């Protein structure tokens, strides 16, 4: 594996009976890179992450994670990866410090008391170290979970929807910490549903129905989507949305606050379709397509292909 890649896998596949949860996924992530892993619920994100860190054995595929073979050396990968799960998985009747000390013992970390003290300081948990984990807010639970992931000094962090249920300030603080760690050489694969978080990533990977649909930087993903979008505002937008949906040349109509975004990968056909509606009381203007527009199109196209 080239030394600059933390993740370099091809054809990763996982089946559960007749269900193909992950279907031939190729993914490359550079060391020190933050890769956003996007997809709807049930798309295969969690299954793929668990295969990478050795919790699930792949049924097919090959490649390396941190230089280890993902099929034959999965046990070795576990010691160099931190995995933050969707659900808070620490003992709620133990304090923050007691939870971290337990994790340090599980990993057999030498000088674990010093390691715990350093981690408490690094994540701003010193003043709360004797607080019970079960009494923490969502943001502080997230901080505890991140601290536990960092205790054994991993080289790769796999974070599965880490900011679900967390308030905006805590989310911002979390992402500031992520970028600080990435600048020190730590690599991240982060499953998220939030488009503003996706924009904070160096690289994106879109998955649906177990298949990887697009990869690249946000600019690259937007350019390759070749999506034309118009914004329209005015009265009775729901009725307008119903009139526009399904017209030839229109691929999606989505409400964004007090506007609709009307998009298509066929620019000329889109403009013909909306021409009869471009009159008062509606105000139309072309806009740059955003990641959410592209995300919705990718999801819709994956359902169309399946059908």
Image (cartoon, rainbow, N blue to C red):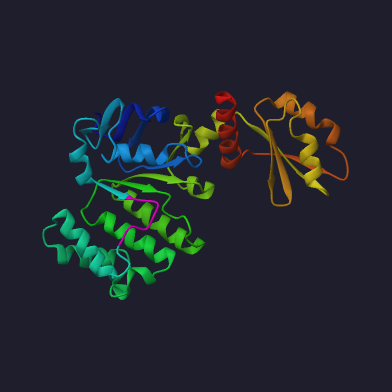
Q: Position of residue 57 (x, y in %)?
A: 27, 34
On the picture, is 195 further left or further right than 241? left
Q: Position of residue 261 (x, y in %)?
A: 70, 41
On the picture, is 164 further left or further right than 94? right
Above or below, 15 against 38 in this view is above
Q: Which residue appears at 35% of the width and 54% of the height?
A: 180
Q: Quadrant of residue 143?
A: bottom left
- Camera-nearest residue between 285 and 88: 88
- Camera-nearest residue between 170 and 89: 89
Q: Which residue appears at 47% of the width and 39% of the height?
A: 42
- The residue sitting at the front extreme is 17
Q: Quadrant of residue 3?
A: top left
Task: Give the position of the N terminus as an image quadrant.
Answer: top left
Magenta span: predominant SS is loop
- Camera-nearest residue between 32 and 102: 102
- The residue sitting at the right extreme is 280
Q: Which residue appears at 28% of the width and 54% of the height?
A: 149
Q: Position of residue 152 (x, y in %)?
A: 20, 54
Report the number of numbered marks.
Answer: 0
Part of the protein shown in magenta: 84-90
On the picture, is 302 further left or further right than 12? right
Task: Give the position of the C terminus as an image quadrant.
Answer: top right
Above or below, 115 against 269 in this view is below
- Reply yes or no: does residue 86 show up in magenta: yes
- Reply yes or no: does residue 39 show up in magenta: no
Q: Which residue appears at 60% of the width and 28% of the height?
A: 226
Q: Quadrant of residue 223?
A: top right
On the picture, is 154 further left or further right than 296? left
Q: Position of residue 25 (x, y in %)?
A: 39, 28
- Camera-nearest residue between 98 and 194: 98
């Amino acid at each position: 594996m080239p030394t600059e890649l933390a993740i370099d896998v091809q054809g990763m596949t996982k089946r559960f009976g007749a269900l193909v949860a992950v279907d031939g996924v190729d993914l490359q992530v550079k060391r020190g890179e933050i890769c956003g892993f996007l997809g709807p619920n049930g798309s295969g994100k969690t299954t793929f992450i668990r295969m990478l860190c050795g919790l699930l054995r792949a049924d097919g595929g090959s490649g390396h994670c941190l230089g280890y073979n993902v099929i034959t050396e999965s046990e070795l990968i576990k010691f160099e990866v931190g995995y933050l799960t969707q659900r808070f998985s620490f003992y709620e009747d133990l304090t923050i410090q007691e939870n971290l000390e337990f994790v340090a013992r599980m990993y057999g970390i030498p000088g674990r008391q010093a390691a715990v003290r350093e981690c408490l300081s690094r994540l701003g948990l010193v003043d709360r170290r004797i607080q019970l984990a079960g009494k923490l807010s969502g943001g502080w639970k997230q901080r505890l979970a991140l601290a536990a992931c960092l205790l054994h000094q991993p080289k790769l962090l796999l974070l599965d929807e880490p900011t679900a249920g967390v308030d905006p300030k805590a989310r911002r603080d979390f992402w500031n910490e992520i970028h600080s760690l990435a600048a020190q050489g730590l690599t991240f694969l982060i499953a998220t549903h939030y488009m503003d978080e996706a924009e904070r990533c160096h690289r994106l990977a879109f998955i649906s129905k177990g298949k990887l649909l697009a990869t690249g930087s946000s600019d690259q993903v937007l350019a390759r989507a070749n999506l034309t979008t118009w914004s329209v505002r005015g009265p009775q937008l729901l009725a307008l949305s119903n009139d526009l949906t399904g017209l030839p040349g229109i691929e999606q109509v989505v409400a964004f606050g007090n506007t609709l975004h009307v998009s298509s990968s066929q620019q000329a056909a889109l403009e013909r379709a909306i021409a009869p509606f471009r009159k008062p009381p509606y105000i139309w203007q072309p806009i740059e397509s955003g990641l959410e527009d592209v995300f919705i199109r990718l999801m819709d196209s994956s359902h169309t292909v399946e059908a």
